[in-house]
Amino acid sequence: MSPQGTGERSRLTIDYRNSMADAVGEQHGVSDAMLDEIAPEVAAQHERLVAEHEAGGQRWMDLPSDTGLVEEIEAFAAEARGRYRDFILVGIGGSSLGAIATVQALAHPYRNLLSDERRGGPRFFVLDNPDPEKVAATLATVDLPNTLVNVVTKSGQTAETMANFLAARQALEAAVGRERAREQIVATTDPKVGLLRALADEEGYRTFPVPPGVDGRMTVLSAVGMLPAALCGCDIGGLLAGARAMRASTESGDVRRNLAYLLAAISILADTRLGKSILVTMPYADALFGLSDWFRQLWAESLGKKLSLDNEVVFTGQTPIKALGAIDQHSQIQLYTEGPNDKLISLIGVDAYRAEVTIEEAPAGAPELDYLKGAELGQLLRREQHATAWALTEAQRPNFTMSVPTIDAAILGEFFYLYELQTVMGGALLNVNPFGQPGVEAGKNATYALMGRKGYEDLREELTATDGAGERHRWGGGRPPPPHPRE
Amino acid sequence: MSPQGTGERSRLTIDYRNSMADAVGEQHGVSDAMLDEIAPEVAAQHERLVAEHEAGGQRWMDLPSDTGLVEEIEAFAAEARGRYRDFILVGIGGSSLGAIATVQALAHPYRNLLSDERRGGPRFFVLDNPDPEKVAATLATVDLPNTLVNVVTKSGQTAETMANFLAARQALEAAVGRERAREQIVATTDPKVGLLRALADEEGYRTFPVPPGVDGRMTVLSAVGMLPAALCGCDIGGLLAGARAMRASTESGDVRRNLAYLLAAISILADTRLGKSILVTMPYADALFGLSDWFRQLWAESLGKKLSLDNEVVFTGQTPIKALGAIDQHSQIQLYTEGPNDKLISLIGVDAYRAEVTIEEAPAGAPELDYLKGAELGQLLRREQHATAWALTEAQRPNFTMSVPTIDAAILGEFFYLYELQTVMGGALLNVNPFGQPGVEAGKNATYALMGRKGYEDLREELTATDGAGERHRWGGGRPPPPHPRE
């Protein structure tokens, strides 16, 4: 456990003044009156969450306390780090985004290029997309006899994951034979039920649990996220300690004293009352871009819901966007500043980066560049972040800044827990169930039908019937349109 | 030049039926009547573009014809590919996104991990963000005595690029001395004026031109995008041939016969008439994710503009989102299907991926997975794409599908030219100037002010004055808020 991550106190701070009406005007900013108004609802929902947790629900809140699991994972990972040259994580969505975010934040940016000694553990590959180009390249690049495969799916039903796993497994078996291949596979899945559980039991794979009662997108602090992180040498004890620190800092039901609830309230008010239908998360650190992508799934799948209210159907949910400072100043800030005022923008700043690069000399004969002489890059990046916050505010674009002292395992754990609690409260304030993803069933079923899975014959017939749209909308250099959705 | 990319005929096709009212309803789909209505405006703007081009404007349209530049770049790159082990591109925004998109689409997914022989050219690194962690790691990872640095900025004013360049240059100089370092630097910049031009002339750097009269985000088909691509072994002749093929296929002023204008019309109508304020670009191929990111800059910076009309200020521009199929089915499709109906979604499909991976065996004892036996991953991915288009349409979410026969240099060139023309027409239909980015000046100036650049003293004073907001909105575990925007 990192010395900072003792669970004593969270270190993440926020300055949300620029999201308030005082800074960006009544039309675009949250007012104190709005916060007053929503405070009783936040307090009531907080009571409900606490009660549900005490009654055995909201199990994701308990993950940060499972230090026994950390020990078990560490024991496995310590041995595997010494044994394997390569490691493939097979998983998609909630089964890969957390691990990717963690390794990106905590490992060397070019970890796979380091020498075996410097790397301290296997190279890290992810098979998330069933893209044959990527999968074939991955299986041809790794050193199969010295590769560990971790397949992650709670149910074993996920088409992409099972397809990628079966492809990886047959490559392993071709390289080392069926017996040895079994020893190179570890499954993270439901402890009791499901297709992958049955397969793992039959084949004798080592397994780790996907925690029951926890939504897939909230499993980063379980074996789902922590096993890959530990294999890449990340401090998973520190991760949980940070999450515990944030949990301890977010026990109040007062919207102004609970950072997660405050962020939920500002975001939901900005969306529903001020037309900020887009939530941009823009860290000023390459290492935190994966965190932004992880949050993007959490916010979108949890709050993007269809509600039937009084004979009316309501579609909820802000659209989350992952951005990266300062890069997106050269891509998106023009739109964020002068385009539609429909965004709430979250900047993430780092007080002390883990490296310093100082420019010793500016070119002689170019006085315009003198300001760079003696400049340190982290200082430049922070000033760009401050300048962007100021320029957005001048243009009446609501924004807030989250700041961390540095990037380490505990801070990442704080972010994970904070965002999860913020999202659960966001769902409560929108009156939607933040768990589950009923809207993806239709597409999943259509895939099964097109793939010829048994039980989906009727849908297959519907999908492959002539659609009768004729020639009118066809396009392209003489080619017929793609068979769409026909096969 | 690739045999396919002979400039004869474009190969990209579109099926846009699912974006029409017939498929998703009058409230969400473009109608034939709307296309009829906008057709005269499209035709008139087309005439204007043609006239401007004939009068010496719209110079980006000429880039695909510059085969002389291809020869010059190829000659330089052929020699450099044999000489250097590593290559660092220093540039940001329009000076890096095109090269990244090209290398990602055309090179091996793990190119930097391949052996020197298999790679056929130097490893590829990009210094875009002035993130000290990334910059320090990059400069420590490359083999400096055998590294080529390509700095790309038209003016030489871009703070991030010049800072990163000066950091890279001092590392080179420390490794090989000042004289040899000069030979390892190539500058892509304005042929005549600017800070980098002056510096390059003084130091004797080899240079390539940023084409005059072309906006930075439309320079991918110039030396800006093509030099890095050629250094990584991409077929830049094929790239231009594909762009010429698309140019030849988009000469009509008829909105229904010009693919670029049709896409512009559908997007702008969906935005301004149907409330689709978000444009998602979701290729079903890892290799095309960079293209989606390149387009995201193009669409956002070109159309995200502030307009003063009749004493009213209007903020224009759809918000572009980069997504990736099938991964984002497990992250964003819940929101896209059941969240607010405020998106137009562009799927990109690939008829034949460059690799095949076939699953030979499904697990015995799990009949639910039988459908994967004999399945090929590309087939699975295409069916997921078709299923997603179908499910979106069922939920009345407008979408269209662009299809390509495979991914190669010529197809990428088609995309680049198509998207550029679409964007220029989009600006015309919105009545905004698609060139320039006036909205980023405030933030740039604030950065200069905070960095102490001469001439920005007044702004610095304004930014660092006490802002008087007091304690009210401070947050965090006892820490004062970040000095924001104060330093």
Image (cartoon, coloured by chain):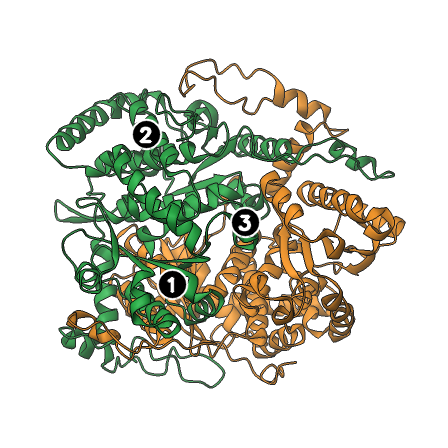
Chain colours: A green, B orange
Element carrying mark 3: helix
Residue pointed to by mark 3: A117
* Residue A465 coordinates in the image, percent (x, y): 22, 81
| Tag 1: amino acid | Asn
* Residue B452: image tag: none
Which mark's residue is nearer the viewer, 3 or 2? Answer: 3
Q: Are marks 2 and 1 on the same chain?
A: yes
The answer to whether residue B77 is seen in the rendering is yes
Q: Chain of mark 1?
A: A
The answer to whether residue B283 is seen in the rendering is no
Q: Residue at x 81, y 51 (%)?
A: B181
| Tag 2: amino acid | Ala
Q: CA distance from mark 2 to mark 1?
A: 32 Å
A22 in relation to B101, above or below: above
Q: Are marks 2 and 1 in contact (CB under 8 Å)?
A: no
Residue pointed to by mark 1: A129
* Residue A168 coordinates in the image, percent (x, y): 36, 67
Pick the residue in front: A397 or A246. A246
Direction from residue B57 to residue A318 in the image, left or right: left
Q: Chain of mark 3?
A: A
B164 in relation to B354, above or below: above
Q: CA distance from mark 3 to mark 2?
A: 41 Å
B82 in relation to A28, above or below: below
